[in-house]
Image: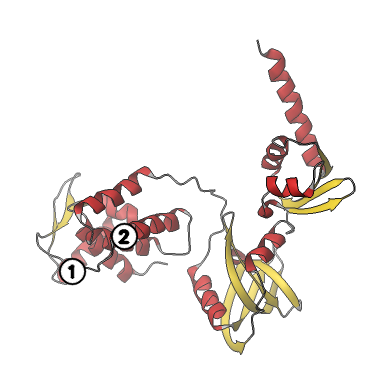
Amino acid sequence: MYSPTTRLLTVLELLQSYKQISGSELARRLEVDVRTVRRYIVNLQDMGIPVEGERGPYGAYQLQRGYKLPPLMFTDAEAIALTLGLLAIREFNFPVQVAAIEGALAKTERVMPESLFNQARALQEAIIFNVSTESGQLDNDFITPLSLAIREQRQVQMRYQSWSGDMSERAFDPYGIVFNEGFWYTAGYCHLRNDVRTFRLDRIVALLMTHERFERPVDFNVLDKVLDSVVMMPGGNQVEVILKTTLENAQKTIPSHLGTLEETDDGVILRRGTSEMHWIAFFLLSMDFPVQVIQPAELIELLKRMGNRAHEIAAQAR
């Protein structure tokens, strides 16, 4: 939950950033109701901060002219970078409180000269993020101690729920964190399985950093481990396709995060796990070399239906 104090300070930052801002807009940005916004305004006024408000459906709040807190100075490039970064963090549902993001944006804008301020506002108004809604929601209470444990190389005790719903307790040495296709993952040494494992952070139920230390392998690549694990993770259909081309050409066509490639006498075998067949089918149809689907049967049937539909459309064309 967001701290009321954090929201109160964010209201102050927004009031300093905008000449006027309505109660409904403040409520939208802070994800609270208008009545709560009014309470925050009263709290600020009780603290001696000169907030003025206009009554009525189109009323707005503003700070008394000339009231400013000491600014934090950024270069032009830093201010633009911060604006873009904060926008991306908000749209990708990174584990940061909305109130903290809005407060940081407001602070950044407040110290900008007019021309730079206009650029920053233009970025916010012009950019649209096409973000998948099927992303794992992550609790900041987990990613912060996990990041600290990675930095200090300290073991954690973790309660984890698998895709099938099974619960387990395990000691875990986290080596790093990866954000991939809308989900957060960590990879490291699992003492329960006595092997390196990959876990989705949104499936962590409880996490506690311990005083036990570990040594991170020098040559361990967290990103490669996570990508290799993701394409074969359980909980969906296992896709196996033979690509009638060379390994070199397959590697140029298929990014490593989309699956594993194995060279055989029959061609290059593409393997990955997925719960969504349609994009796999469209992806295979885009190949400029022959493709043979080995499994699953659902993918074969889907391709047949898509082929019949394409034939019907082509037959009706004039």
Q: What colouring method underlies this structural image?
A: secondary structure
State the residue at coordinates (72%, 53%).
259
Q: Is residue 215 above or below residue 45?
A: below
Spot the residue most to the top: 318
Please give the name of the residue rendered at 34% of the width and 58% of the height, measured from the top-left corner.
Answer: 30
Residue drawn 18% across the image and 69% down it: 69
Q: Which mark is residue 311?
A: none
The image quarter in which residue 152 lies: bottom right
Seen in the picture, residue 66 relative to 190 is either above or below; the reply is above
> Which disc, if any, is residue 79?
2
In the rendered image, residue 34, in percent from the top left (x then y), is placed at 28, 54
Could you tell me residue 309's position as x and y percent? 72, 24
- Numbered disc in front, either 2 or 1: 2
Residue 310 position (above or below residue 36)? above
- The three-letter amino acid code for the residue at tag 2 is Ala
Labels 2 and 1: the sequence-earlier one: 1
Q: Is residue 50 left or right of residue 37?
A: left
| Figure check: 167 above or below 272 | below
In the structure shown, which secondary structural element does the residue marked by tag 2 occupy? helix
- Horizontal side, residue 178 vs residue 23: left or right: right
The amino acid type, in three-letter code, at marker 1 is: Leu
Residue matched to label 1: 69
Near mark 1 (Cα within 10 A), the count class, few <14, some 14-19 or many ≥20, is: few
> Dividing the image into 4 quarters, which one contains the N terminus?
bottom left
Q: Nearer the viewer, residue 159 or 18?
A: 18
How far from the left and from the top, in percent, is residue 153?
A: 58, 83
On screen, residue 152 versus residue 19, left or right, reads right
Q: Label 2 crowding class (10 Å Cα cut-off): few <14, some 14-19, many 20+?
A: many
Quadrant of the rendering where the C terminus is positioned: top right
